[in-house]
DNA sequence: AGTATTTATTGTCAGTATGACAATAAATAA
DNA sequence: TTATTTATTGTCATACTGACAATAAATACT
């Protein structure tokens, strides 16, 4: 560090600039069958007492937003994110001055996708405090519930992002086990798009190019067995995703 | 407001939570001919003295990030953004704890597209202070210059976002006048993608569906005159964009 | 056991989009 | 007048799409 640079740092007065509290909000999604669920917290205190809210929390002094999102995800869900494969990405930042009536809070919203066997939802930490998160069907919540703060806006933005992204990437596979059958992947699409049944034949044709057949088969209760596939690595949307632990500390 | 809610607000202690300074950084783009330019500020002080940096500034207490981005764009460029059509959208938020060595600064990066006649760049405010912004060819800068802070990361993210977005929207038209010829639009694509000449015939065929022929023609110095088109409103990427002034105050 | 049922996968086919390239048309420059 | 530049339209083989039928492989029911 040069002398001039050192001088500069000493002259710098952080108090001169407006400061805000920085938080992360999480849209945590998982699929069972063909319904899409999100994790919500029922607010116990004001403001928006009794309303559903997205889980979230403050960003620590030595974290960036993505680290904080991973940490909050672990805390709120009580999951071992090494075992439960997860995908976390930044969505957008919400900074309206009055979005939280108590103080200036800027929130970096994140999208988190949890892998399931498509039959049971990941268990959310039961031993947590009153602000424990619970699964709710997303499209039902959007149709019936009032959400706290600007969380409806965040949630719809998250759904649009995901709906768009699965059109040109295999991000949908992040909601399934490592190996999965085509009908499972198809159900994920139907869940996210909240749509009618997609044509199974055409779906198969379009997907198989990006998938690798493992040779193994599923045995469903009825019908022919389905082949188990894996996503060919070159088709996973971001070539590399930062692992949960790896911070910059 | 209920009694309980009022009690809560009084008990709330903003000082209990870590606070950060919030800024916006702008990737301001414009096209002439078939080269893409961005506005940069040459840093006069430490850190990163002498390096190119993106224009930006602090978010005021009564602004959200998008308002601040519009304001900074007006200040740094000295442009009347009513006349010069402009498009501003949020890109992503950069929050690494040490991204600014002086203090904790979290920056919401924005992408700004300025309309040109595709021959001359918008003039950047000459009567401004030492931190006046200047146009530099983007791909050249990326190949040769070192950028301050994490601004290289921001810039490449901005370019990727734009390159992807013009594949499925007519956002490229935001870099051109209200009425434009197909060769102008084609040059914008070539500039953004930094690529060889695109086939004019195929380009015409693909675009005309989303464009409206005004009936008027351009007169270039050589060659046949080109028809002037307008973007059909239903194809402009976001159905509504927030106008510069409209804040929530 | 044998038949119906469910489901995965492959096949068919018409409509449409794509990229490469040629042909035509309309202007200016020499 | 002719050459040149550029916009636009045409051609064509290939590929993808969506709708729908046909086949194959398993289980459920009687």
Image (spheres, coloured by chain):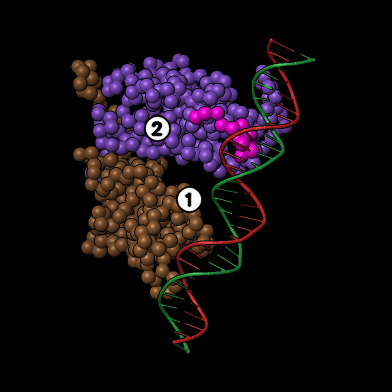
Chain colours: A brown, B purple, C red, D green
Where, quadrant-wise, is the C terminus of chain B in this rendering? top left
Prevailing secondary structure class for the magenta stretch in the rendered image: helix
Comparing A149 with B148, the one in front is B148
x, y percent for residue B131: 38, 19
x, y percent for residue C19: 56, 38
Query: Residue at the spot x=43%, y=61% of the render?
Result: A182
Residue B156 visible in image = yes
Residue A57 visible in image = no
Local SS, label 2: helix
Comparing B124 with B70, the one in front is B124
Residue topped by disc 2 = B156
Local SS, label 1: helix
Query: Residue at the spot x=61%, y=31% of the render?
Result: B200
Q: What range of the chain is rendered magenta? A: B195-207
Comparing B94 with D15, the one in front is D15
Q: Chain of mark 1?
A: A
| 10 Å crowding of disc 2: few (<14), some (14-19), many (20+) | some
**Residue B197 on the magenta segment:** yes
Q: Chain of mark 2?
A: B
Residue topped by disc 1 = A167
Residue B18 picture quarter: top left
x, y percent for residue B245: 50, 34
x, y percent for residue B155: 40, 31
Q: Which dot marks residue B163?
A: none
Does A27 sit left or right of C26 as displayed?
A: left
């Amino acid at each position: 560090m040069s002398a001039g640079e050192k001088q500069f740092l000493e002259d710098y007065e952080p108090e001169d600039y407006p400061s805000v509290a920085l938080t992360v909000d999480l849209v945590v999604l998982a699929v069972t069958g063909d319904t899409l669920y999100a994790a919500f917290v029922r607010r116990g205190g004001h403001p928006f007492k009794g309303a559903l809210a997205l889980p979230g929390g403050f960003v620590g002094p030595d974290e960036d937003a993505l680290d904080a999102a991973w940490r909050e995800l672990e805390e709120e869900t009580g999951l071992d994110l090494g075992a439960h494969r997860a995908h976390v990405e930044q969505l957008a930042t919400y900074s309206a001055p009055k979005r939280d009536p108590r103080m200036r809070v800027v929130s970096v919203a994140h999208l988190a996708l949890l892998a399931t066997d498509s039959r049971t939802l990941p268990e959310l930490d039961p031993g947590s405090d009153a602000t424990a998160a619970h699964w709710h069907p997303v499209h039902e919540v959007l149709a019936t519930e009032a959400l706290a703060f600007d969380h409806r806006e965040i949630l719809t933005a998250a759904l649009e992002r995901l709906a768009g992204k699965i059109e040109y990437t295999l991000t949908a596979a992040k909601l399934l086990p490592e190996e999965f059958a085509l009908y499972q992947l198809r159900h994920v699409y139907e869940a996210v798009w909240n749509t009618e049944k997609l044509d199974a034949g055409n779906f198969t044709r379009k997907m198989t190019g990006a998938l690798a057949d493992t040779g193994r088969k599923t045995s469903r209760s009825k019908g022919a067995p389905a082949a188990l596939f894996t996503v060919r690595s070159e088709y996973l949307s971001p070539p590399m995703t930062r692992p949960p632990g790896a911070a910059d500390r």
